[in-house]
Each structure stands twice: as structure tokens, then as C-alpha cells.
Amino acid sequence: MTKDSRRQPPITVEEAAELQRARDRMIARDRLIDEMVDNDEMQIKNEHARGGAEIELACAVRGAARAEPGSDAHAELERAIARLEMLREEQRRLVAEREWLNTSLREIDSSPSSGDHQRSGHA
């Protein structure tokens, strides 16, 4: 044993449980932040994909306007419309997921532990 460890009394069961809760809270918060970073990355990729799909749609509209009915240009227009709608739906899903992550993080950050009360002087 070191000189410092002999001076400190062993922690109580309650203190050990509080340390475990604090550790679990820290891990949960860290995981949420990792998920937020992943969500941000997916939203950026989706934004770029939607920009490309909007350009493709504009080209398909122009091509379909010049083409004969029933031609490949009309099928391409339908595919471009479907692709853009799929990307917009994905964007809505990502935004909803991010809102849930934000709420979850606020809940973790606003839930005080008993150690927070002791450190701040609150009962």
C-alpha cells in the first residue's frame, strides 16, 4: 500500500453505487454524442445527395419535355422524382432522430446526481 491509500477510508456501498451511476451516465452521454456526430455526418451526405438529385430532376424534366410520350426520358423523370422523394424522406427521418438525440442529451445533462448536490451545496 502507498502512504496515500492508507490515509483514505474505504468507500461505502452507497458511494460505490453513486460512482457506478456517474460512470454509467458518462458512458451514456458519450454514446449519445457519438450518435449525434454520426447523425450530423449522415445529414451532410444527404444534403449533398439531395442537391445532386435536384439537378438530375431538372435535367430529367427538360429531357422529358422534349421527348416523345412513353420514351426513356419519361421513365428517367419518374426515377428522378422517386429518388428525390426518398432522399427528402431520409432527411426528415434524420432530423427527427437528431431531435430525439438532443432531447436525450438534455435529459442526461439536467438530471443531477447526488454528487452534484453535495458539490454545489444543495440538499
Image (spheres, helix red, strand yellow):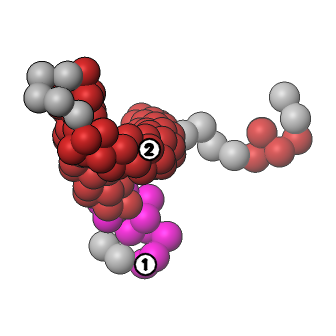
Q: Residue furthest left?
A: 69
Does residue 1 appear in the picture of this structure?
yes
What residue is rendered at 38% in x and 68% in y? 117
Mark 2 is surrounded, within 10 Å at the Cα level, by few (under 14), some (14 to 19) or many (20 or more) other residues, namely few
> Which region is colored magenta?
110-121
Image spot of residue 114 (x, y percent): 36, 58
Residue closest to the eye, 13 or 66: 66
Give the CA separation, mark 1 to mark 2: 56 Å
Q: Which residue is mark 2?
A: 52
Image spot of residue 29 (x, y percent): 44, 46
Picture quadrant of residue 81: top left
Amino acid under label 1? Gly
Is 94 within the magenta? no
What residue is rendered at 44% in x and 44% in y? 52
Sequence order check, earlier mark of 1 and 2: 2
Image spot of residue 1 (x, y percent): 84, 28
Q: Is residue 79 above or below residue 18?
A: above
Mark 1 is surrounded, within 10 Å at the Cα level, by few (under 14), some (14 to 19) or many (20 or more) other residues, namely few
Does residue 53 appear in the picture of this structure?
no
What residue is rendered at 25% in x and 21% in y? 72
Amino acid under label 2? Gly
Residue closest to the eye, 14 or 33: 33
Is 115 within the magenta? yes
The tally of labels here is: 2
Picture quadrant of residue 113: bottom left
Q: Is residue 120 above or below residue 32?
A: below
Q: Is residue 11 left or right of residue 83?
A: right
Question: Which secondary structure class fits the magenta region best?
Answer: helix
Circle number at residue 121: 1
